Image: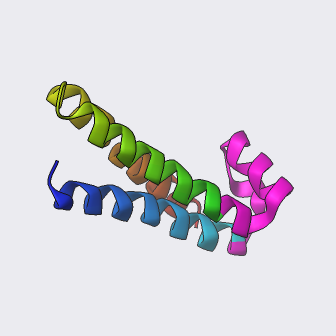
Amino acid sequence: MPLAAFVVLVAAQGFDHASFLVMTARHGLEAEFNPIVVAIAESFGLPGLTLVKVAAVAILAGVVVVLTPRRRWLGRAVLSAGVVAGLVGGISNVATF
């Protein structure tokens, strides 16, 4: 997998997280639709949520690295799902602004 693919993954997930921070600063945590994100934020605060987000992206990237040599299509599909999830999350957060 080219490095650019991982940069796109990190950018999409970073967009999701940054837009979440702006959204919750303006409207509070009630504006978040994902109950898992709400539970993590309530339990561990924003620093804990940030650590979970970073860990999730790192795990996803690791899965892609392991899958790609044997099942290139599956590695690309997992990477694409991670990018799409970040973009959808970020766009839905921006729509709430």
Residue 75 drawn at (x, y percent): 25, 34
Which residue is located at x 76 percent, y 60 percent? 29
Which residue is located at x 32 percent, y 34 percent? 78
Residue 88 drawn at (x, y percent): 43, 48
| Quadrant that contains the C terminus | bottom right
Judging from the image, the colouring scheme is rainbow
Is residue 55 located in the magenta-colored stretch of the structure? no
Q: What stretch is highlighted in magenta?
A: 25-49
Q: Which of the two residues, 82 or 34, is positioned nearer the viewer here?
A: 82
Q: Which of the two residues, 88 or 39, is positioned nearer the viewer here?
A: 39
Residue 43 drawn at (x, y percent): 85, 54
96 relative position to 83: left or right: right
Q: How many marks?
A: 0
94 relative position to 12: left or right: right
Q: Is the magenta stretch mostly helix, strand or loop?
A: helix
Q: Which residue lies furthest to the right in this view?
A: 43
Which residue is located at x 27 percent, y 56 percent? 6
Residue 67 drawn at (x, y percent): 27, 31
* Quarter-of-image position of residue 93: bottom right
Which residue is located at x 70 percent, y 74 percent? 26
Q: Which of the two residues, 40 or 70, is positioned nearer the viewer here?
A: 70
* Quarter-of-image position of residue 33: top right
